[in-house]
Amino acid sequence: MSRLGTETAFEVLAKARALEAQGRSIIHLEIGEPDFDTPPSVVHAGLSALQHGETHYTPSAGVPELREAIAAHLNKTRHLAVDPGQVIVTPGAKPIMFYAMLALLDEGDEAIFPDPGFPIYSSMITFAGAKAVPLVLREKNDFSPDLDELRSLLTDRTKLIVLNSPENPTGGVLSQTMIREIAHIARARDLWVLADEIYAEILYEGTHHSILREDGMAERTILLDGFSKTFAMTGWRLGYGVFPWPLVDPVTKLIANSVSCTATFTQRAGAAALTNRPPEVAEMVKAFRERRDATVLGLNKIDGITCREPKGAFYVFPNITGLGLGDSATVQDRVLREAGVAGLAGTAFGAGGEGHLRLSYANSLPNLQTALTRIGEWAHAARDGRSTSVAAAGRITSADR
């Protein structure tokens, strides 16, 4: 159990809630979930399934209708060649990481993961008994990996590379050229790839490039995706993976031994979302783009903070080293306590995140503008050595959520 890590976002959320219980106003930019409701048509499909008695077990890999809808969706939108039989449905997308790593990694193996990156990657690698090897994503490279550095990390024990594009926490996107080079490395070294594409449909420019489409990658790639981000369905717990044929039966056994199956009504809702794509999805992405633009602009106006423009997901990853106010964890804590804005230290996503904060712009534009004002006033006061409590100045008067 000591091998397991966690998600700092939930720890910061608990601290923020405690401050709110004391009467403080906190703007929440720490949790990575859309602030939009699940589209009504999707909710209706789930309710209808419940009302028609679909409250029983399903096949462990998922109901055929959803697996078929997922394969058709991927083949149409990402130009893949996925058979429904390769699709395995899970309660949320995290189990795909868990099952893939349990299935592939043995004691002594090594797996390369992005740093900064989603913290559960390294947690699951280590839990499986393997060595987690960080591939640092640097701001100067627009948070894309250095291929020479990737090659230098490979050893005879390397078995798996984890990719995430668009990426959490940076919003970085891997180019088609980068994807092809990584595919070449994976083929040459006979490596598995876990491609986390959970944010693939929250993209602000260009098109998404899946490594699964590259020559020779279908037999060595696990594609991870789900409904939480695209369809604002975080609480529904619905994810899926596309597995090479030799892994389908073993991973299905892992499901049978752990969660048995995914809730039927949730799967029916997911099938409806893919079959009749709700217009609210495009509206949500449009809103995220507007919020991204406003957030990046506002952060870059604050002395001591610089912020690159993310190309996907709904996070910014500003550089806060110019503030000169301590490490990322210190700034995270002070911004929460003194400015009333909950964000995450870049180091919550690995040592490579030092010098940054992650802020989610999955919040209303007015709240984001208020958060930017608070951070700017706090930073100015803190650097001048004056009182840094925005609350003390009487500016927090209502519950901004």
Image: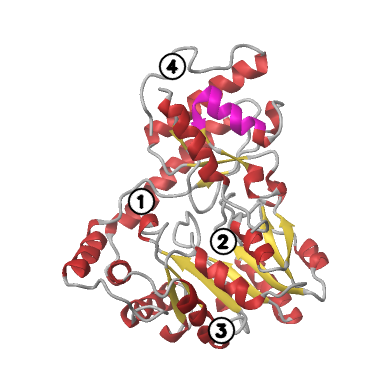
Circle 2: residue type: Ser
Kindly identify which numbered label has been placed on residue 165: 2
Would you name the residue on which mark 4 appears?
395
The x, y position of residue 45, in whole percent, is 22, 66
- Tell me the element at label 2: loop
In terms of secondary structure, where does tag 3 sit?
A: helix
Q: Which quadrant holds residue 88?
A: bottom left
- Of discs 4 and 1, which sits in the foreground? 4
| Dot 4 alpha-carbon crowd within 10 angstroms: few under 14, some 14 to 19, many 20 or more | few
Check disc 2: other Cα within 10 Å, few if <14, some if 14-19, many if 20+. many
Task: Tell me the residue that label 1 is attached to.
Answer: 284
Residue 271: assigned label: none
Name the spot of residue 248 as percent of width and height, x first: 51, 84
State the quadrant of the C terminus. top left
Position of residue 57 measured from the top left corner of the image (x, y, whole percent): 32, 77
Q: Give the residue at the far front of this rendering.
A: 1
Q: Quadrant of residue 67?
A: bottom left
Say which of marks 2 and 3 sits in front. 3
Closer to the N terminus: mark 3 or mark 1? 3
Compared with 329, 390 (above or below) is above
CB under 8 Å between callouts 3 and 1? Answer: no
> In 3D space, how far apart are the residues under numbered discs 2 and 3 (Cα atoms)?
23 Å
Say which of 37 and 212 sits in front: 37
Q: Earlier in the sequence, mark 3 or mark 4?
A: 3
* Magenta stretch bounds: 330-341
